[in-house]
Amino acid sequence: MKQFVFLFYLMLLAALVFAQTTTLNADQIRQEIARVRHETNYNDPVKAKEANEKIKELSKKLIILSQTPNQKSNVPEKAKSEDEADFRIQLFDDMTRIVASDKNSEMDLALGLRNEIVEDYKEDESPKNIPPEFLQEMTLLVIDMSLPTIQRTIDLMQNYKSINTLVITGGKNGAAVNLADLMTRAAKFPLKNLYIINFREFVTTIPEQVNQFKYLSTLAIYNNKISQLPNLSGCSAQLDSLFVDSNPVATLFPVVSSMSKLKALGIAKTSVAPAEINKIEALLPKCKILTK
């Protein structure tokens, strides 16, 4: 039951966080999400599942509305927006399962992400020959360090021009990674969403190069062994979502105190004390703190 409620809330939160439009249609979608939430009997698993599916569909529509048209693109904007919306919904589903599970080792975030790689350009799960127009228009890039051929993708990173969502994952069991090198290669990306997920003991710190992404709105570092966040002052101005779930983080206040736009803070399965949570709530009253 708690998982149904949490999934419902997360989908609602995802829609609110990623939506950047104030059009009437967007407002109507938000109202419908609120109505479904209010009218659903979550004691009934069937109704709860139906509501979750409805929220997913509404959230997808809201995300698509938030996409900014690219007049230079040769790929239909509707298709690109729908692909990215599907990816975000799938990613939040996967993250929800990790946070709700007591057996993180059985979760493979990379599985769903790998399915998002365009089939036409797959070769041993890491593309080798990619047309220049694809590099120009791709907005989502997944770096799965568990793939034996992933260096092919890493070597091409500087050729991508439009990446706004970067996912760096350790696959099912975690993998070694040089995050500082990847951040340097991604320096020119117009990045808005950064996910560093499922590295377990292979990632204990986040390099301060993350501060080069001035327009970052979402930073998620699920399921690693990070005990302390770096100074995020360089990217804190636009950050509205920060997820540090499933990390041995003990304190966040010094880092989040400057994040005036923060709307969502995920701290499930961390060591953040209740006293500090209360302190953050007092400082950032508009921020939703997710502890489950």
Image (spheres, grey):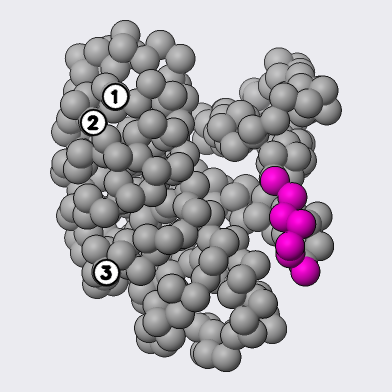
Query: In the image, residue 131 lies at what x, y percent?
Result: 64, 85
In the image, what residue type sits under mark 3?
A: Asp
Q: Residues within 10 Å of mark 2 (few under 14, many from 20)?
A: some
* Camera-side residue of 30 and 152: 152
Residue bearing mark 3: 181
Query: In the image, residue 268 lies at what x, y percent?
Result: 34, 35
In the rendered image, residue 69 lying in the magenta stretch gets the answer yes
Position of residue 24 relative to residue 153, above or below, is above
Q: Residue at x 62, y 48 (%)?
A: 89
Q: Residues within 10 Å of mark 3 (few under 14, many from 20)?
A: few
Which image quadrant for residue 234?
A: top left
Query: In the image, residue 262 lies at what x, y percent?
Result: 42, 26
The numbered mark at residue 258 is 1
Task: Verify CB contact (< 8 Å) between mark 2 and mark 1.
Answer: yes
Position of residue 33 relative to residue 113, above or below, is above
Q: Which residues are magenta?
A: 68-74
In the image, what residue type sits under mark 1?
A: Ser
Which of marks 2 and 3 precedes in the sequence? Answer: 3
- For mark 1, give the secondary structure: loop
Q: Residue at x 71, y 15 (%)?
A: 38
Q: Residue at x 43, y 73 (%)?
A: 158
In the image, what residue type sits under mark 2?
A: Val
Viewport quadrant of the N terminus: top right
* Camera-side residue of 37 and 156: 156
Viewport quadrant of the C terminus: top left
Foreground label between 2 and 1: 1
Residue bearing mark 2: 255
* Camera-side residue of 232 and 270: 232
Query: In the image, residue 97 lies at what x, y percent?
Result: 48, 48
- For mark 2, give the secondary structure: helix
161 lies left or right of 199: right
121 lies left or right of 51: left
